[in-house]
Image: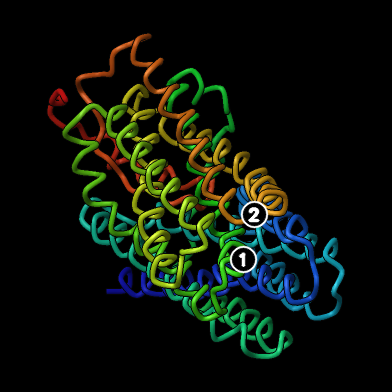
Amino acid sequence: MRLLISFASLFLSVGLLQLSSGGVGPLDALSGLAKGFSTAQVGFLGSAHFIGFFIGCWWAPRLMGSVGHSRAFACFTACGAIGLLAHTFTDNPSLWALFRIASGITVAGCYTVIEAWLSAKVTNQTRGRAMGAYRIVDMGASLIAQLMIGALADVETYMAYNLLTVLCCASLIPLTLTKVRQPPTPQTPRLRPMLAVAKSPLAVAGVVIAALSSASFRMVGPIYGAEVGLTPDQIGLFLASFVAGGALAQYPAGWLADKFDRRWVMVGFSIAAVLSCLGSAAAGMAGSTGAAGAMLSAALFGWTTFPVYSIAAAHAHDFATNDERVELSAALMFFFASGAIAAPLVTAKLIDIYGPPAFFAFVAAGHVLLILFSLSRMKVRDTVQERTPYVYAPRTSFTVGRLFRRERNKKIPPKDTV
């Protein structure tokens, strides 16, 4: 029972943290546009977030080893609260970018602590339920955070950022008050990006394109919504539709990835993503998007692009040994974070130059390249017959691989052909 209470505390901290961190990106975009920021400046705020995320992923295990789980979590939460509240002190976009770096550090740092704690406390009997609950809480809070944007956009900027600050600080309470003893600090996984390249160049390409899709939409999606005439509350629904579409895609994506050659599954989702993007871009150019059409476009975009990361990761793990899984997960996260740093700024500049349809055209071009690279890799080598199960892998920290290592160590029957 005490273990379950400990999990509940961790999950509540995750939910509150996601409500805060998931809302700041869209709020920054809408507030920045209202204050006269250029599209490129708003895009750079998204890139700054992932710069902070990258720093936090590297720093968090080391800080946790020095001061322990709870103190590290408190430190990272304080960084996030300072970054959020500091938005109200100035309208300088360069300083806002600095504050977003602090928010990115918070996300990576807090998730590293939570995932290390979970990894140490779960057992074979509780692992399945714990991981399922963790995914549901994280995805559910992310969905609610997007829906909050419409309400926050209608209130004074000072109050909106204060609300996110309160949620960030509140995430401290459940974790710091738990009576369960902190687990030993796990060994920091070595960051070896070339391990991922050696195991599967295609998987590396897949996670980079997944970063291009996800980071662009999360950070620049509000700009697109504003450009096509959506109101702030509709922009919240627009972003939530993306998250909902991605969540609904996980089961069919997992079923297909476990039954058929994962390279062809990735190609299939990328083809669907290209068609979805081209349809949305064409509607935008014709000026016929409309609120309902925008929501449908976002849901289809999430459904077709969200599973690409997990499919690519599963394909990479098919070629890894059990001892390599944690480091391989960290290496894939490295490439995801690297792609996510560049994507919002590039996308925002394209929208600035060519208009809203350039957003979907850019993502479509990325998936076309992934399709071509996938087909070329199929000529180089065959996939393995004995594979690991598909795992929905959250993009939260370099240490997330510890949580799902046991699931990946299982084997599924040989693949069918397509």
Three-letter residue code for mark 2: Gly
Q: Is residue 85 left or right of residue 122?
A: right
Q: Note whether residue 185 is visible.
A: no
Of residues 78 and 343, the one nearer the viewer is: 343
Residue drawn 68% across the image and 66% down it: 75
59 up-or-down from 23: above or below = above
Q: Which residue is mark 2?
A: 355
Mark 2: few/some/many CA within 10 Å (<14, 14-19, 20+)? some
Q: Quadrant of residue 404?
A: top left
Q: Position of residue 55 (x, y in %)?
A: 69, 48
| Count of numbered badges drawn on the protein | 2
| N-terminal label among 2 and 1 | 1
Q: Position of residue 408 (x, y in %)?
A: 29, 37
Q: Note whether residue 13 is visible.
A: yes
Q: Are marks 2 and 1 in contact (CB under 8 Å)?
A: yes
Q: Which residue is mark 1?
A: 227
For marks 2 and 1, give the CA distance.
8 Å
